[in-house]
Image: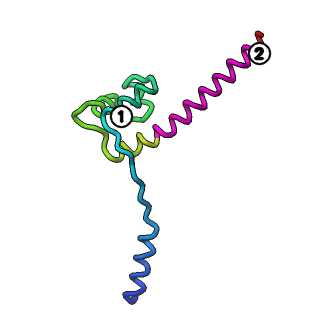
């Protein structure tokens, strides 16, 4: 049987491996603002994040905002979507520049 000190050491090691991440709170208004910033309907946004349109409508209503796990998912999607949108914009500008150069 292990001594208390070895049990305590294992417990301390487990505690040291825990990760704590602060999730930004996303209110109903934040969800709607994010969706509109992407220029998406509720149905399209639902497809984009992988939930039914009714869930998006519920998140955006004052009845119920997203749950904590949904807020975490939405925060990750929001962070990554900005990067994707910026990359698409840069690509579009490069394509437009190439067209101007060819027709120039």
Q: Which mark is residue 101?
A: 2
68, above or below 82, in the image: below
Marks 1/2: CA–CA distance: 41 Å
Identify which residue, 84 or 48, lies in the foreground.
Answer: 84
Q: Under tag 2, what secondary structure?
A: helix
Q: Residue at x 77, y 10 (%)?
A: 104
Q: Quadrant of residue 67?
A: top left
From the top left corner, tell me how far across and down residue 26 is, in percent. 35, 40
Q: Residues within 10 Å of mark 2 (few under 14, many from 20)?
A: few
Q: Residue furthest left?
A: 63
Tell me which numbered mark, 1 or 2, is placed earlier along the sequence. Answer: 1
Q: Residue at x 65, y 22 (%)?
A: 93
Identify which residue, 67 or 85, lies in the foreground.
Answer: 85
The stretch drawn in magenta includes residue 96 = yes
From the top left corner, tell me how far across and down residue 33 is, in percent. 38, 29
Q: Residue furthest top?
A: 103
Residue marked by disc 1: 30
């Amino acid at each position: 049987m292990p001594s208390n000190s070895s049990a305590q050491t294992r417990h301390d090691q487990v505690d040291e491996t825990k990760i704590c991440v602060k999730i930004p709170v996303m209110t109903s208004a934040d969800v709607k603002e994010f969706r509109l910033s992407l220029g998406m309907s509720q149905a399209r946004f639902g497809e984009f994040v992988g939930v039914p349109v009714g869930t998006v409508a519920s998140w955006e209503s004052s009845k119920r905002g997203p749950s904590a796990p949904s807020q975490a998912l939405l925060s990750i999607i929001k962070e990554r979507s900005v990067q994707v949108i910026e990359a698409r914009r840069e690509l579009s500008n490069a394509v437009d520049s190439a067209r101007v150069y060819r027709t120039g």
